[in-house]
Amino acid sequence: MSSLADFSDITQRDRSLAEWTWLKVGGPAEYLVEPRSIDELAAVVRCCHETGVPCRVLGSGSNLLVRDEGIGGVVLRLSEEAFGEITIEGSTVTAGAGALLSHVISHSVRAGLVGLETLVGIPGTVGGALRGNAGGRSGDVGQSVQSVTVMTASGEQFTRSEDELSFGYRHSSINELVVIECTFALTTGDVDETLKRMRKLWIMRKATQPMAHQSAGCIFKNPRGISAGSLVEQAGLKGESVGGAEISDRHANFIVTAPEATSGDVLELIERARGQVTDQFGVDLELEIGIW
Ligand code: EPU
């Protein structure tokens, strides 16, 4: 049986994760492991499985809050080249889970392909975007998926095709431990028109969201038919702060952090917003971000 010591050249002990999250707060991972190939990834995953060590995958940290005390076990970071490749064949685009969604969008648009451009401005890696079916008013990532290759917690790899997958509002049926890669089925279109559409969406997003600040995208999911941001605003919480964390005065479903913020500040603010929205409107807000 292998042990984590066998992977010491790709492992950092007690590595802070704060710099890799968009909120820039939170504690360390007991083991931060960066595999160099899919085989190496499978070996680490199998090792965790056999030795009972908890294992999670870090994307680009854009939808994640890590608690101040940090987390035990292994955090995998798919930062190496093997996980970030983007290849285009005809009108399909295959991207590694570690590739940034924004890179996949720009590669596709430059190749004259249409379908992903509506996701402009959405942060995150392909793996993270698929897991939470990232999207906005103009569509979500699931709409363009042809197949997804995943790895289970025991290190087994397989590909799920479109008809074996389902995507809902900020939800996907992908429940295996790791997303390895995804193939998107796009259509051909006019590059200039696509760029124009993208520019418009980008401007709208910049006007309504605090994009220049440290934040983690929307904190809460929208309850059916209502904007969580507008509920938090109506509860009078725009600009409310705890320590270095503040509810954005641009969009109340965003929490922005100052350099001195802690994860505890963000958690307290989340609880305050949730509590007030429940008390005033009887609506229970569900978290969109993940908390480790
Ligand atoms: N609103 C307020 N106050 C606020 C924020 C919004 O009154 O503080 C109002 C707006 O004026 C607007 C309505 O609420 O009339 C909807 O707001 P917006 O267009 O910003 O959309 P949203 O529902 O708040 C959703 C997604 C965003 C996505 C945008 C644009 C969720 C939780 N949010 O926001 O996604 O960027 O639409 O497509 O689904 C994310 O998931 O991380 C995210 C930011």
Image (tube, helix red, strand yellow):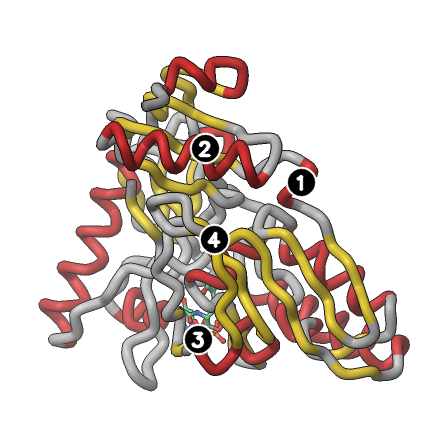
In the image, residue 209 above or below residue 99: below
Q: Which of marks 2 and 4 is nearer the N terminus?
A: 2
Per the image, the residue denoted by label 4 is 157
In the image, residue 199 above or below residue 5: below
Judging depth in this view, the residue of 235 and 106 nearest the camera is 106
Callout 2 amino acid: Ala
Between label 1 and label 2, give the one nearer the viewer: 2
Q: Residue 76 falls in which quadrant of the image?
A: top left
Query: Marks 1 and 2: CB-CB under 8 Å?
Result: no
In the image, residue 242 above or below residue 253: above
Q: Residue at x 64, y 67 (%)?
A: 183
Callout 3 amino acid: Leu
Per the image, the residue denoted by label 2 is 43
Q: Earlier in the sequence, mark 4 or mark 3?
A: 4
Between label 1 and label 4, give the one nearer the viewer: 4
Q: Which residue is drawn at 59% across and 62% down?
A: 182
Per the image, the residue denoted by label 1 is 82
Query: Could you tell me how many numbered marks the image carries?
Result: 4
Between label 4 and label 3, give the one nearer the viewer: 4
Callout 4 amino acid: Gln
Query: Marks 3 and 2: CB-CB under 8 Å?
Result: no
Per the image, the residue denoted by label 3 is 165
- Graded by Cα atoms within 10 Å as few (under 14), some (14 to 19) or many (20 or more), the crowding at tag 3 reads some
Callout 1 amino acid: Ala
Q: Residue 236 falls in which quadrant of the image?
A: bottom left
Judging depth in this view, the residue of 135 and 4 nearest the camera is 4
